[in-house]
Amino acid sequence: MSFEKLKEFLLEAFPDTKLEPQESSGQEIAVALPNSILDLYRIVGPNKLTIPAYGNDFYLPSLSELEDYQIGYAIDGRTHEEIPDWPHNWIVIADQGADPFICDTDTGKILYAQHGVGIWEAEEVFESVENMLWVMAITGKIIESTGVDFTDADCYIKEKYVDLAVKKLSEHGFNEGHDILNLLGWC
């Protein structure tokens, strides 16, 4: 897999998506961004990217918005000061309904946490930002292509679409499909 193939997949799956290569000026955020994040913006170019998800959509800000995107997580929204309990090596790079996907800049791994639980208890969910975006894109394409048939009368995902997602994830090298889908609330 590569960022180039990921960009092609996103444009095919979501033709109205706005992807624009963005180069870092080094001024976007106080923390040094890892190469994987710089490559994401340089090659894929998410620019206020919204991807359909089960429940709230996934959202990735543009590179120029990344600093402001830390407000409410690493930065206090009222004082604009750093929140002392937020680890300095964490950068929020995406969210689903304000639940952040966090890049650990020391490891490049992606963590996930739920907001509103009192303290941030982030768990590792993806090996890389590329893997995170592939999973979002694959599951989002399924949701987009199935429309109202995606869920049953009780708003649960139909089993045939869970099976399809596991198959599609496996085709892209994600052999732990059920675990990933469980994280995303599909199972």
Image (tube, grey):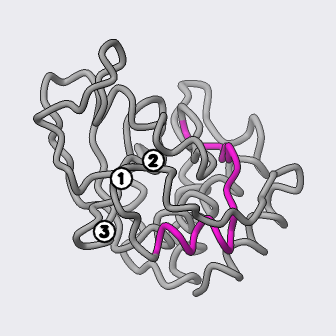
Neighbours of disc 2 within 10 Å: few (<14), some (14-19), many (20+): many
| Residue shown at the point (70%, 82%) measured from the top left | 5
Q: Position of residue 37 (x, y in %)?
A: 48, 67
Cβ atoms under marks 2 and 1 closer than 8 Å: yes
Q: Is residue 11 left or right of residue 105?
A: right
- In magenta stretch: residue 142: no
**Structural crowding at the residue carrying mark 3, measured as other residues with C-alpha within 10 Å and reported as few (<14), some (14–19) or many (≥20):** some
Q: Position of residue 14 (x, y in %)?
A: 81, 55
Find disc 1 in the rendering and name its residue.
182
Q: Amino acid at mark 2?
A: Trp
Q: Say which residue label 3 marks.
A: 109
| Mark nearer the viewer, 2 or 3 | 3
* Residue 91, image x, y percentages: 35, 51
Distance between mark 2 and mark 1 Cα atoms: 5 Å
Mark 2 to mark 3 CA distance (whole Å): 22 Å
Residue marked by disc 2: 186
Outermost residue toward the right in this view: 15
Q: Amino acid at mark 1?
A: Asn
Q: Which residues are magenta?
A: 36-54
Crowding at label 1, few (<14), some or many (≥20) Cα neighbours within 10 Å? few
